[in-house]
Image (cartoon, helix red, strand yellow):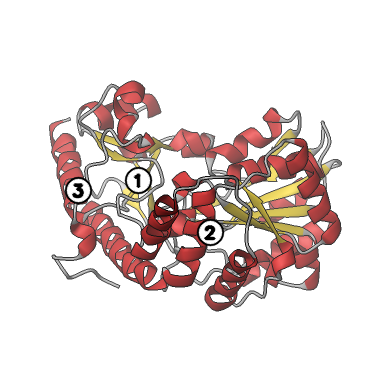
Amino acid sequence: MQNKDTNHPLDQRIDRKNSSSVKWNGLQPLFSAPDAIPLWVADMDFTAPEPVLKALRDIVDHGILGYAMPAPSFNEAIAAWMAKRHGWKVEPEWLVYTPGIVPALNIAVEAFTEPGDKIIIQPPVYGPFHKLAKTHGRVLVENPLIHEQGEYRMDLTHLEQAASQDGVKLIVLCSPHNPVGRVWSREELNAVMEIAVKHDIIVISDEIHSDLVFESGKHIPYAVLSEEAKMHSIICTAASKTFNIAGLHTSSVVIANKELRLKFKNMIDKRSMGSMNLFGLAATEAAYREGEPWLESTLEYIHGNLEYVVNYFKTYIPECQVTMPEATYLLWIDFRNLGMEHKELFDFLVTKAGLVFSSGTDFGKEGEGFMRMNVACPRSMLEEAMQQLHEAMINR
């Protein structure tokens, strides 16, 4: 999957400054680096699919922007997408909606645990996972991934030990994994399931990156593993990463277990978070119904970007270690051979290389000396970024 077309539509550079973009408008207030190249926030510098934009224009042209609720066709579009892309039969009544996956994770913690209960996560992992326990008066239990020769895998022996503790109620799985880019194998997921079932633990699986998988890996929804997995899990999905519509704050949570679904819905009502975004509903349905050609083309382009950056590091900056991810448009880069303290490293990248990455420590202490790089941008931007990094490394 290489992008050899130098005139690809995604090569177009679109000015996002002054567009209320966190990635671009945050450069000055957060890093005092207004001219840096932003490779941090996980959204794409590509326009959304044309069917999505048309659906949004149709709403604006209609002119009435009132309260919204999902139509049956919305549920049907999600179910059809899951069946086609992942071989997963989702019944429409299993679907619950939230204004994003992070809100869904917090709702789940409140719905299925009590103060003092324990929650297992697998760092280095998406920053908000780390806040779930402290925010709600729960206890965080870390099951760090094993990192060997640039590859990551689950520490299943330690997971069994962690799960056997009194008071563990949730395992929060990141599948595919952000930031390391792993697509978990059926064997790994089955092992997690066996541990969860043995200890009567609910699995919350964040599968927001499930559509951004390359040929080296195939995403397996946790709920398809077995009847027990289906009935003891909360699967969080969204079109937001897949089609670059995160700003519309619309996510789908799949809960096959009626009792768990009712508890989850009750907590949504308690927190007054049940209102849906009119634009998010229209964009999500249009994306799932008509966005697949755009996705296939975009995945090919992103894969080419990933190959370009990985090969650049190997050729010109071999002291930094980076492994091709199985999924996502994110690279997890190991800068530890530079011998810098983490803050020194981050400052060096911003001030000397003119680049803003996501700091590795945002994903846990296991991220010391690492940075996460977003490559979902025009190739020319990546070329500039890598040249700036190379020059900074030479001159440091």
Residue at the image point whose x is 73% and y is 35% from the top: 271
Residue at the image point whose x is 75% and y is 33% from the top: 139
Q: Is residue 330 above or below residue 335?
A: below
> Measured from the top left, where is residue 253 in percent x and y?
66, 56
Question: Quick one: quadrant of the N terminus?
Answer: bottom left
Single out the mark in the foreground, 3 or 2.
3
> Measured from the top left, where is residue 159 in percent x and y?
71, 51
**Amino acid type of disc 3?**
Met
- Tell me which numbered mark, 1 or 3, is placed earlier along the sequence: 1
Q: Is residue 121 above or below residue 56?
A: above
**What SS does tag 1 mark?**
strand
Which residue was labeled with disc 2?
176
- Tell me which numbered mark, 2 or 1, is placed earlier along the sequence: 2
Residue at the image point whose x is 30% and y is 35% from the top: 24
Callout 1 crowding tier (Cα within 10 Å): few <14, some 14–19, many ≥20: many
**Amino acid type of disc 1?**
Met
Q: Is residue 328 visible?
A: no
Q: Nearer the viewer, residue 16 or 234?
A: 16
- Circle number at residue 373: 1
> Measured from the top left, where is residue 166 in percent x and y?
86, 41
The CA distance from mark 1 to mark 3 is: 13 Å
Which residue was labeled with disc 3?
381
Question: Quick one: quadrant of the C terminus?
Answer: top left
**What SS does tag 3 mark?**
helix
Residue at the image point whose x is 78% and y is 53% from the top: 202
Callout 2 crowding tier (Cα within 10 Å): few <14, some 14–19, many ≥20: many
**Amino acid type of disc 2?**
Pro
